[in-house]
Amino acid sequence: MLPVIVALVFIALLVIQTTFFKMYGWTAPDASLITAVYMGIRYGRIRGYQIGIAVGLAQDIFSFGILGINVLSKGLTGMASGWIREHHVIDYQSPITWMILILSSTALNEFILQAYAAGFFDAEFTIFGFLGATFLQCIINLTAGMIFFFFMDMIFTRLKSILGIRDAI
């Protein structure tokens, strides 16, 4: 039941990302990245990787972009977040940890996207362009991600108390 809740919230966020924000030309929070990081932190490396690939594929399909690049970047993001949690490098319930993971994952995602564009489409890759795009996307993802993480934890806590579910990890 809990993964269904995450899936429904992700679908709502993806629809908002690919329609509302794109319709007005704004830079959108990356719902797939935020979901991959959250699921990696919450459920570990394998589940983070699986969910990362699924949300990356959904983003590739609905954003009319290059197929495959979001699958790669979101899968790696989910797996890395889960690996860090499984090896007890972080306190997965700390908001400071969430912030660090969202920021580092956004930077990794931007690097993968720009390197891919430079390698396959001869797009210009400059450090100033990379830093500018990364800084703006980090601020947007951090704001949306922290709201998403608190919201999902609140929902999970309430559902677990109602259903009598305990964490396995």
Image: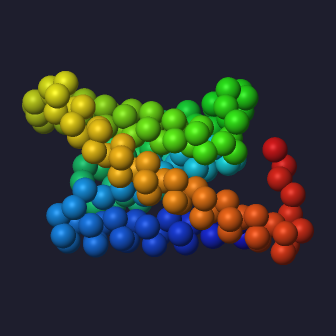
37 sits to left or right of 57: right
Res 148 visible: yes
Check the picture and name the quadrant holding the C terminus: top right
68 sits to left or right of 10: left
Residue 168 pos. (x, y %): 84, 49
71 sits to left or right of 42: left
Res 77 visible: no
- The one nearer the camera, 105 or 76, is 105
Q: Is residue 65 above or below residue 96?
A: below
Picture residue at 84% right of the left edge, 69% below the top: 161
Tell me where residue 111 sits by quadrant: top left
Residue 97 pos. (x, y %): 59, 38
Give the colour scheme of this rendering. Answer: rainbow
Residue 42 pos. (x, y %): 67, 48
Check the picture and name the quadrant holding the N terminus: bottom right
Tell me where residue 153 sits by quadrant: bottom right
Picture residue at 55% right of the left edge, 33% below the top: 80
Instruction: Give the total of numbered labels.
Output: 0
- The one nearer the camera, 28 or 67, is 28
Picture residue at 16% right of the left edge, 33% below the top: 129
Q: Is residue 129 above or below residue 145?
A: above
